Amino acid sequence: MNQWNNFSKGFFKENAVFTLLLGMCPTLGVTSSAFDGLGMGLATTFVLVMANLVIAIIKNLIPDKVRIPAFIVVIATFVTIVEMTMQAYLPDLFESLGLFIPLIVVNCLVLGRAEAFASKNNIGSSIIDGLGMGLGFAMALTILGAIREILGSGKIFGTVVFPEDYGMLVFVLAPGAFIALGYLIAFINQVKKEA
Amino acid sequence: MAKTESTLKNMVLTLLVITGVAGTSLGFMFELTKGPIEAAKKAKQEAAIKMVMPEFDSLEKDTTIANTNFFRASSNGELVGIAIEAVSPKGFSGNIKIMVGFKPDGTIINYQVLEHKETPGLGTKMADWFKTDKGKQSILGKHPETNKLTVSKDGGEVDAITAATISSRAFLDAVRIAYETYNDNKSNEPVAANTSAEEGGTE
């Protein structure tokens, strides 16, 4: 039960985007479509799980005063692995996510979990924490991407719902990301209050 | 296991080991993905060539022209089209790289956008906009000599993408660059020159 809580907290109670407000740069930058949001979320999940795993293993070997640079090197290594793998096998997704893939390194969510969780807990819990947090992040990005895609260009996961000419362009652009995210957070806070 | 103390020796050693391991594994990963990345890029380029060229059975890259990719496609030994890669730096955010296919006489057959960083939902429409036969949008079948291929705002005959005039201008600029490359190099290849001369003789 404890591990289940550890896993599920990432989806709602401590969701990275809706509650902790971490990792806002990719959240606002790549969510112009649901598919891009999902791809970004899954790439981040992989980095989170692997970084949490490695850091949980080596946490006792790292002297306290150099732990942050050590964590960043571990995270950057996995991000580069994701970048090269995606470029090789998913070139289209790589192209639409572009610069945001290398920027996973500076996503506060990844370093935040390494510092706050993986460096204090055992290997098993750290993997589950990374998985829960990462999938919660992916879920948030997909929801935001879907809302922006359907309002902005009348599509959902690339399937046409209504003609693009009737879409509200602002939702495709950056301001639309702020507007949609603001309403989503308000909605989730309201649900939390009632619960 | 006790926590390692923060002495200078320990800190230097730990960071050295971590960066060493990270570097080695990345080098290994790079070797592993180098092939597939090259293959993916090549497949994309080939798909773009197929898209902008009529049916062909042999394709030859002209390596004598610096800084650009220039392909001659021929069918049964006869030149049927030329595919040229062109980059315009005038995009709304960064370079726009396209591949344009020309008939041997310079008429535009088709184009394909290869790389760009334009705004999603606005400038990105150029992938289809200039192919759509609606109003004065399409540039297919036009000849850059006889048709003025600039946006109507600048006195040309092409309708710009709604709300993305800068992207449209940059796209047409890339088309112009491609045409200039075509014009400068269409006849400097002996094989191609001979083919057209023979054609002229038999007619």
Image (spheres, coloured by chain):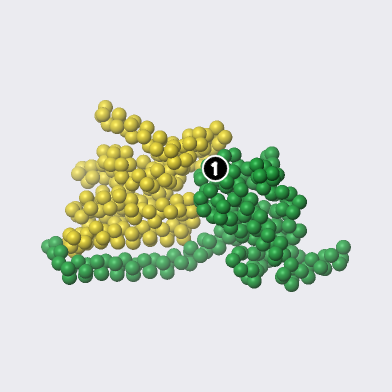
Write down the colour of chain B: green
Residue A186 lies in what quarter of the image?
Answer: top left
Task: Count up the numbered dots.
Answer: 1
Looking at the picture, how far across and down is residue B112, in whole percent? 61, 53
Q: Secondary structure at mark 1?
A: loop
Quadrant location of the C terminus of chain A in the rendered image:
top left
Q: Nearer the viewer, residue A97 or A68?
A: A68
Q: Is residue B56 visible?
A: no
Image check: A121 left or right of B62? left
- Please, which chain is the residue tagged with disc 1 on? B
Image check: A1 left or right of B106? left
Write down the colour of chain A: yellow
Looking at the picture, how far across and down is residue A4, in whole percent? 24, 43
Q: Is residue A186 visible?
A: yes
Residue B125 lies in what quarter of the image?
Answer: top right
Image check: A133 left or right of A95? left
Q: Nearer the viewer, residue B12 or B23?
A: B12
Looking at the picture, how far across and down is residue A152, in whole percent? 49, 36
Looking at the picture, how far across and down is residue B158, in whole percent? 68, 44
Considering every residue shown, the one lying at the far top of the view is A194
| Residue located at (40% from left, 49% from top) | A40
A6 in relation to A170, above or below: below
Q: Residues within 10 Å of mark 1 (few under 14, many from 20)?
A: some
B152 in relation to B26, above or below: above
Residue A61 lies in what quarter of the image?
Answer: bottom left
| Residue located at (45% from left, 51% from top) | A97
Q: List the residue tagged with mark 1.
A: B122
| Residue located at (40% from left, 35% from top) | A179
Q: Amino acid at mark 1?
A: Leu
A1 in relation to A88, above or below: above
| Residue located at (42% from left, 45% from top) | A29
